[in-house]
Each structure stands twice: as structure tokens, then as C-alpha cells.
Image (cartoon, coloured by chain):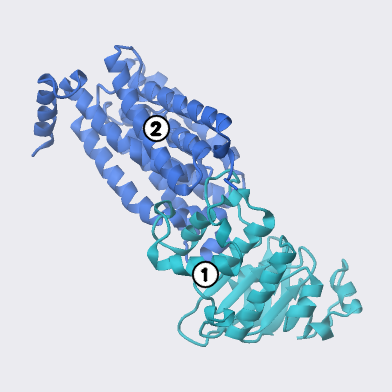
Chain colours: A cyan, B blue
Amino acid sequence: MTAAAKLASAGGPRIDFAGIDLTLGRTRILEQVQFSVAAGSVHAIVGPNGGGKSSLIKTLLGQMPHQGQLTVHWPSAAEVIGYVPQALEFDRGLPMTVDDFMAAMCQRRPAFLGLSRRVRGAIDQALAQVGMLDKRKRRMGALSGGERQRVLLAQGLIPPPQLLVLDEPMSALDEAGIQVFEQLLHAWRAAGTTVLWIEHDLQAVLRLADRVTGLSRQVLFDAPPAEALTPERLLSLFSVHPRSEGVA
Amino acid sequence: MSYDLFRQMIQDWANAGYLPEALAYGFVVNALLAGLMIGPVLGGLGTLVVVKRFAFFSEAVGHAALTAVAIGILLGEPYTGPYGSLFGYCLLFGILLNFLRNRTGLSPDTLIGVFLSVSLALGASLLLMLAGKINVHILENVLFGSVLTVSAEDLLVLGIVALLVVALAVPLYNRIMLASFNPQLAAVRGVAVKTLDYLFVVLVTLVTVAAVKVIGAILVGALLVIPAAAARLVSQSLKGFFFASVIIATLSTLLGILLPIVLDLPVPSGAAIILVAGLCFALAALARALVPRLQGNPA
């Protein structure tokens, strides 16, 4: 079975952000954000810290009251969203193995009763894909940051998502982990999964994304990476008072 | 078979020498049965209390029970089991605390500190006002627990609460835990994070109130924390963590009820239960220090 077949889904949705405004208290977080994510594409979002990337994700996941039109065009009735967060909040001394964590994520049966037979196959496969099968009995708190990031990627594979939202998945990965991530990204693309990917590593975006949106409160650019990631644009994106080019 | 017949049967067997002598007393049978319900439920729920860092909250709810008892007596409820005010006040306390935690942005420990002290001040004032009207020894029972006063009605309340907590917490265990790891991830996976937070607060409150009779208001929160904390020290997986916590809590409760009776010690049951649990914690800490395998992972 190819990696793409393993990740097979019904194909990803197209997402349209149209005039999205978000204000928290007196702070304007997002201002007239307008761009589209093509179905089945790998779409990166780059921008400075505090530029509204995470808020945009929260808006997409329905956790932020916003103004404007956000439309997700699902190709089928099944709407499966996967999410890979940047980090987990948990007591590092907690006796929770990788298997326990995966069980808590993927099954209803209480994790303290072990993996249920129904999801065991999928969990085995997901852990194998991220190279964590041999560390499944380790405590989550004893893993390195990169290993924990791989486990977070593994949970994002179950159930196979049509839309996958990645929040800086490479930040803690080592060289081998980055290769694993790149393989997954190729497999998602091959399976037609729509991937919305927040990333700081601009080299990786240039190499792996189909399209990139520069976000610093407003959309500063939205284009294929080779076209978008020019020194001038990046200078503008990461400067304190960015100027919009009005590209949509 | 009614509960009275069952208890009589146990007492008869104890009188005939088939069971320990202490079980010849009806109140001991009542108390042990209460312990058999309290131990596993508090031990199991305690693992979630530790995972979600709710230890201080469960302590505060226990202390709120003190105020609730005073309000109940003032309102004319029976002082042996003012369940109306106990459940009413403690649920209000827990739910309001959670509501404000979501709204004020204050850290949970700060907010609990405020609630706990105000509630204790109210409880102390009311109890002192009542002191002239009631037998103050009743307060000892409320504060530190008593095995002498566990009635069939208490057992019924405890049984219903235990069933309810098990029926809700077991199927929702993963989701309650997941909500504390990353609320956003939990929400994407279909977990109603805020609703589950409230549900958890209600479950902790219910079980705390139901256990006040045996363990007492001052110490009831500790049985949600100490067994789980001890289990956390020596476990390597969630399975070990959960079941070790259940076993330690059950063992502590049963020994804490039986030992003062068997050894004829004038120690209240609540204090004895927590002392046994504390001993388990000390042993767990010692075991962790002496056995390197308990400190981390096998390679």
C-alpha cells in the first residue's frame, strides 16, 4: 500500500475567506482578510508572531466570533478535519504512554483500558508512518520535543482528514523528523487532502507549498511561493508597519 | 433481599466467627459499604483531578461543604444529613467558580483562593451563630467524618452518586482528559470543552458531598488527590495510574474505617483514612527513589 493510499480521503474542501475581520477587546487581530485555499492544495500561511495566523486558524475551526464570510466547500457529506497543534499542555510527569495518548485521541473506550481493537490497526499504521512505533510504550513526557511533534502528527492521521490544519508542525522536528513530515505532506497532496499549514521555515514553504499567504493582520501577499517569497515582500511582511499590496 | 437483611446476615456471620469481629456491629457494616463505594470512585475520578490540575478545586469544594452544613441546619434540615443544602450550596459554589474562571481571566488558584476563604468565613460565622443551639460534637462529625452516623439513607445517596459518576466519567474519561491537553484540538475532535468542564466540576462536587459523611468536610478533597498523586509516582502508563489510584483509595478508606475500631483508637474516620493514604504516598515516593525503573522509561 502506498503512503498516499494509506491517507486516502474523499478529497479536500476549498476554503474561501472573504472580508474576515476579527477584533478582540480593542485590538484588531484580522482586517479584511481575503484569500482562497484551493481544494487538495498545500497552502502555507507565513507571517510575524502576533500577525493573526493562529487567530485565523481558530476562526476557521469555528472558535472565534468573526465578521465576514468564511466558506468551506466540502466535496462530500463527510467533513473530517484534522488538526496538529504546536504543543500540548500536560504535566510532563504524567504516566501516559504514546499508546495511551493515541487511545485518548482516537477512541471512546477509556484510555486506561488500553487500545480498542477497532482503532489499533489505524494507530499502529499512523505511528509507523511517523517512525514512532518502537517508542509507543514510552511516556509522552519523556519524549524529546521532536518525538512529541511526531506523535501529534500521527494523531492528525486518524481518521484520515479531508482538511488538515497544521500549526508550525516543523518547529521541534529534527532532520529525520523533517523528512517524515515531507513524506506525509507529499502523501496528503497525492490523496487530495487540503492542507492549511502555518510555518516559520520559509525555505520549507518554498520547497513544499503550492501557495503561500503572507499574513500580518491583513493579507500582504497570496501567490505561489516562488513568486511570493521575494526579499522585498518578506521585508515588508516581517517589518513592524507592513504595507499591504492588496493582492488577493 | 432488603439492605437490613443483608446487613443482619453479615453481622450473624461475624458473630459466628466467619468474618472479623468488628463486622458484628451494624454501623461498621454500613461504614465499610460506604467505603467500598467511596474508595474506587474517588480514586478513579482523582486521576482526572490530577491530570486537570483540579486538586485545589476539590479541596475547596470539600471545605464549602462545611458552610453548606451550617446553612442546612439554619434552614431546618436534619443535622445528620443536610443533603439539600450540601448539594445545593456546593454545586452553586463549583459552578459559579467555573463560570467566573471562564469570564474573569483570573488564574484558577487565585479565584479558588478567594472563593475558599469567603466561603469559610461565611461557614465559620454561621457555625458560631449555631453553636449555642446545637451539640458542637455534631460539628466534629461534619469536619472530620464519622463512621457511627452512616445511615441507610446515606448509603442510598452514596450509591446513586457513585453510579451516576461512574456512568458519566468512564465513557467521557478520554474527552475530559483531552480537553485539558489542548482545548482547540479537543474541539476539532468534537469535544464540547466548556460543557465537559462544567460536567467535571459537577461530578467532583457530587462525589465530594456524598463522601462528606464518612471522610468529613476538611479532608474529603484529599482523597481525590493523595491516592492519584501516589499512583502517579509509581506508574508508567494510564492503566497503572488509574488502577493503582483506585486500589490505594479503596485500601485507605477501608483501613481508615476499620483500624480505629479494631485498635480502639479515638481517631475520626476521615483523619484515619487520609493518614493511611498519606502513608501510601510516602511509600510510593520511597519506592520511586529506590527503584530507578519507576523514575523513567526502560530503554
Q: Quadrant of residue B81?
A: top left
Going by the numbered disc 2, the residue's amino acid type is Ala
Question: Which residue appears at 29% of the width and 11% of the height?
Answer: B264
Q: Is residue B137 above or below residue A181?
A: above
Quarter where residue B129 is shown: top left
Disc 2 packing (10 Å; few <14; some 14–19; many ≥20): many
Horizontal side of A16 relative to B25 (left or right) equals: right
C-alpha separation, residue under disc 1 versus residue under disc 2: 50 Å
Residue in front for this viewpoint, A86 or B297: B297
Numbered disc 2: what chain? B
Q: Are the residues under badges 1 and 2 in a single subunit?
A: no
The residue indicated by pointer 1 is A125
At horizontal 45% and vertical 56% (from top left) the residue drawn is B174
Pointer 2 residue: B65
Q: Secondary structure at mark 2?
A: helix
Q: Is there any visible trace of residue B87 in the rendered image? A: no
Q: Between residues A167 and A21, which one lies in front from this camera angle?
A: A167
Q: Position of residue B73 (x, y in %)?
A: 31, 27
Q: Position of residue B167 (x, y in %)?
A: 31, 52
Name the mark nearer the viewer: 1 or 2: 1
Residue at the image point whose x is 61% and y is 85% from the top? A190
Q: Position of residue B226 (x, y in %)?
A: 47, 32
The quadrant of the image that shows the C terminus of chain A is bottom right
Chain name for mark 1: A
| Residue A50 visible to an observer of this rendering | yes
Q: Amino acid at mark 1?
A: Gln
